[in-house]
Structure formats: C-alpha cells, structure tokens
Image: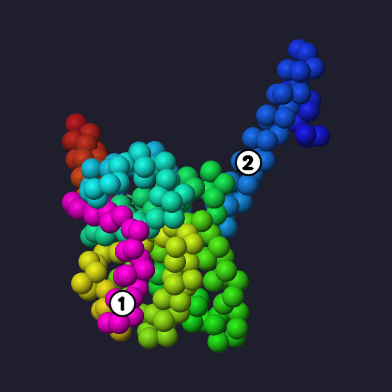
Amino acid sequence: MADIYQQVEFENRLQYLTELFRLAIEGRKSRRAQRLIRKAGFPNTDTLEGYDFSPVTLPKGLDQDYLTDLQFVQQKENLLMVGAVGTGKTRLAISLGIKACLRGMTVQFHRAADLCNSLLELHPAGKAGKLIRDITRADLFILDEVGYVPFSKSAAEMLFNVISNSYENQSIITTSNLEFGRWSEVFGDERLTAALIDRLVHHAHILTFSGPSYRLQQALSRTEHDEDTVLQKTTETDN
Ligand SMILES: Nc1ncnc2c1ncn2[C@@H]1O[C@H](COP(=O)(O)OP(=O)(O)O)[C@@H](O)[C@H]1O
Ligand SMILES: [Mg+2]
C-alpha cells in the first residue's frame, strides 16, 4: 500500500480506502500467480486464448466449460490426453495449468523423461524428497509426454510411487502419444503398468486428439509463405 497510495485519486474517504484496498489485493494476487507460474516449471506460458478445440474429442460427461473452468481440478479428477504428436496435447495441458496458477492453485509440470532422470539422480543421494513433496502437494500435477522414451525399471518404479502418493489427493493431467495397450512398452513391467493405468484412469476423463500435426502445418505454411516471398521477389526483380 505504501507503494501505491499516491496513485489513487481522492474523492472521499470511503471511495479512497475501497480503491486502495482493491488495488493492494489485486497486486498481491497477481504477484502470487507469477510466483506460482515460475514454480510450476512450464516450458512456456501459452494460454487458452486462440486454442482451437477442433482436434479434441471430449469424453461423455466432460463439457468444454467444465474443463476450461478447471472444475476437474477442484474435484481432483484426472485427465488423460492421448493422440499423435503435434495435435495440441502439451499446449492444452500448459494452458490449463497457467489458468490454475492465475487462480492461485499450485501446479507442477514435468516431462516424464526429465522427471525420471531427476528422480534417478536425486534418489540415491536421498535428495528426492523436496521434488516428490512439491509434486504430491500440488493441486495439479502435469505429466507430459509419457511414451516417447521407455523408462528403466527403477525409474518406472519411482514414477509409480510418485503417482501412488498423489493418488486421489490431487488432479493429474497425463499426455501421451500411445494408447494404454502399449504403455507396458514404456514402463517395462506389465503389472506395474496395469496398476499405474488403474490409478491414472480412475476418476479420469480421456481426451483424444486427432488430425494432422499443428507443428507440421505451421512448418508447411511457413515454407509456402517463403516460396511466395521468393516468387514475389523474383517477379519484382524481373520487372
Ligand atoms: N489446437 C490447437 N490450437 C492452437 N495451437 C495448437 C493446437 N494444437 C497445437 N498447437 C500448436 O502446435 C504446436 C505443437 O503442439 P503441442 O501441444 O506441443 O503438441 P503435442 O503435445 O500434441 O505433441 C504448438 O506450438 C502449439 O501451440
Ligand atoms: Mg507434447
């Protein structure tokens, strides 16, 4: 308040104090949100604005408002986002995570392979506690890209323990390019995979993503654009 009290116009005492308190509370909320976003570890700060839902098929019982209003986080329900590379899974997961931070919720974002590497590195030195606590205490845990890299046996077990700890205490968003039938290829062990799917799928909404890769489309339209520019330049020089 000491920083902003001079910015508020004075009309009468009540108006002045109300406005000053409102600004102070807003400032505090926004600083908290920025801190939560930094702590969450997102690779970027994409938002839901401009997100095209046409590649996403929502399951019965989950409408878009329920999803984007983050009611699944309040209900501690899980989301499973399955689909081919570049169809917008990570983008949607991050956008929902950012929105959760803006609402004051705690979020942890981890790419599955990076998390396994960190756990493998920290655990033997007895230093994995903080990481595991941060994840299991968050309102929303986003586990991105399960399926790209197979895990070693001990990494799969540690990841399983983290997910078991957070089970039913928080909401988890998992993204994967593989349907469940092939998850044992990533986690190695059939029984561990079955237990893991059981935990992630219980109370979960499964969203499927289809269509061509956005990345590829963007790259193609860039190439077309470059060709247009080259053509334009050639015509200009010809003239
Ligand atoms: N539905 C969408 N609406 C807007 N942008 C999208 C959409 N899907 C993907 N993108 C963009 O395409 C790129 C790849 O998307 P990403 O979420 O990383 O795909 P995935 O995680 O499914 O491999 C990103 O730059 C993302 O912003
Ligand atoms: Mg992705």
28 is higher (above) or lower (below) than 204: above
Which residue corresponds to mark 1? 193
Over which residues does the magenta segment extend? 190-215
Tag 1, which secondary structure?
A: helix
Give, as a three-letter code, the residue at label 2. Lys
Rendering colour mode: rainbow
The x, y position of residue 37, in whole percent, is 55, 52
**For the point 57% across and 77% down, which residue is it?**
128
In magenta segment, residue 204: yes
The residues tagged by marks 1 and 2 sit, at their Cα atoms, a distance apart of 40 Å
User: Image check: 104 left or right of 192?
Assistant: right
54 is higher (above) or lower (below) than 180: above
**For the point 31% across and 70% down, which residue is it?**
197
82 is higher (above) or lower (below) than 46: below
Would residue 223 be seen by someone viewing this image from the given angle? no
The x, y position of residue 226, in whole percent, is 25, 45
